[in-house]
Image: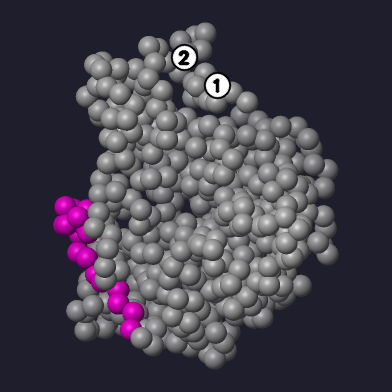
Amino acid sequence: MTSVNASPTTLLGLTDAVPAGNTAIIVPEQNLKITYGALRDNVTALAEQLAATGVQRGDRIGMAMPNGLACVVSFLASSMAGTSAPLNPGYKDEEFQFYLDDTNAKVMLLPPDGLDDARAAARAKGTRMLIADTDASGVVSLREVKERQAIPPPSVDDVALILHTSGSTGRPKRVPLSHKNLTISARNVARGYELSASDVSLCVMPLFHVHGLVASTLATLATGGTVVVPAKFNPMNFWQTAEAYGATWYSAVPTIHQLLLARVKKDAPRPAGAAKLRFIRSCSASLPPQVLHDLEASFGAPVLEAYGMTEAAHQMASNPLPKHGPHLPGSVGPGTDVQITIADDRGNHLEPHERGEVCIKGPNVITGYENNPDANTTSFFDGWFRTGDQGFLDENGYLTLVGRLKELINRGGEKISPREIDDVLMTHPAVNEAVCFGVPHKMWGEEVEAAVTLKEAVDEEALLAFCKEKLSDFKRPKQIHITEAIPRTATGKIQRRVVAQAFAPKA
């Protein structure tokens, strides 16, 4: 296997041993190739520009940027000067305001154009906006910031990245990920898939999530490989891009895999862009076994399903490369340098094939949420973290997930808090009661719907339009059921699964 140092370091320190002339990042739209030497120099310079604006260790640096070179450099520089807090560019004004306020962001990094809601939110919160420009040679710098201020290197225990993870009730939880958490996780991924300097990762996952940041990007940079970063995933030219730059693997949610399969014609030969693939990775949502088989038949590479979450700095388990063991459809594989146990609600460890809550332990796992003692009390026991997922281990340590104890909606890998959508609907003057839930969807895994009771007359179209103004596209209910009463259990409690069963399309 590839030799990967397991000791923690800083994010930029991941690349210390990589020759300066190796290609680190490729931007296909400009056919721009950035070497490791240029990347390290650029990250240091941008971090020093941030320091010159007053950013200090621990300060939160909001980011709303599309995938690309500026996003990668800004993320790494933010983690060196302060703490990176990337946000989904698709958020609406009110959502940006919430996250800027919740993280107490000192500045907001933005691209030169677009993202009007992010700009409006920064103005509303009084957050200084910094524009990240990229010149023709691929150097990223802050517009109108001429000074640079040297910074001491962060320690491995400093928080490099702050993300939010939604719960089924209450406010989103802040997840502080240290340089140690992230670099250990990146090296775990690299070791498990035997990544090396000859590998080329095609990054199609958004870089405001740990999936794209850790698996596609940091794990590749840790081994001196090349990351190809298109501005967005496009099934029309995916294989052309893969062929042009010799992609050896890519990681994606099942939705993206299915979009690629949808373009496969019957009995068509394997795409030329798949010729160099060593494996295909799937993570962040359950991969149907049939999709796994179809991917392997169409693209000629083993499909390895993995299991990750923000609190673990991404990966906890993965099916291995075929030479190291079977990859089992329906299973997310054994733990990858992460301990996994199945426990009951009292913290008792269960036997193989007994179903319970999946719990994890490892140096990549956070030790607590930020400023949330209630969540910490319920989420940790004896050094173990409760994932909220239900599953079982077989006698060989392979993990199978069978359901979610939490009520999150998983739409194409986006974890959505139904409570957040409830609260938005409840702000409509005509809505009396609202319960949001997920329903099965062929492409997205789950789609968002809601049931409401009314105080006064309003139609579904008006409610859908209201949600469109208040919520990101991926969060918006695609159908709202107007009903006389919300289904309840025998004891009078509202349970989302009961509501979903009442309104979900019947098979």
Q: Amino acid at mark 1?
A: Gln
> Viewer-proximal residue, 235 or 280?
235
SS for dot 1: helix
Q: Residue 487: which disc?
A: 2
Residue 22 seen by the camera: yes
* Residue interval drawn in magenta: 119-135
Placement of 386 over or under 365, stated as above or below: above
Residue 333 seen by the camera: no
Tell me the quadrant of the picture where the C terminus can be found: top right
Which residue is drawn at the image coordinates 48% and 47% (left, top)?
414
Q: Amino acid at mark 2?
A: Pro
Tell me the quadrant of the picture where the N terminus can be found: bottom right
Tag 1 residue: 501
- Is there a contact, CB below 8 Å, between mark 1 and mark 2? yes
Answer whether residue 208 is magenta in the image: no
Which residue is drawn at the image coordinates 43% and 71% (left, top)?
68
In three-dimensional space, the C-alpha distance between marks 1 and 2, rounded to whole angstroms, equals 9 Å
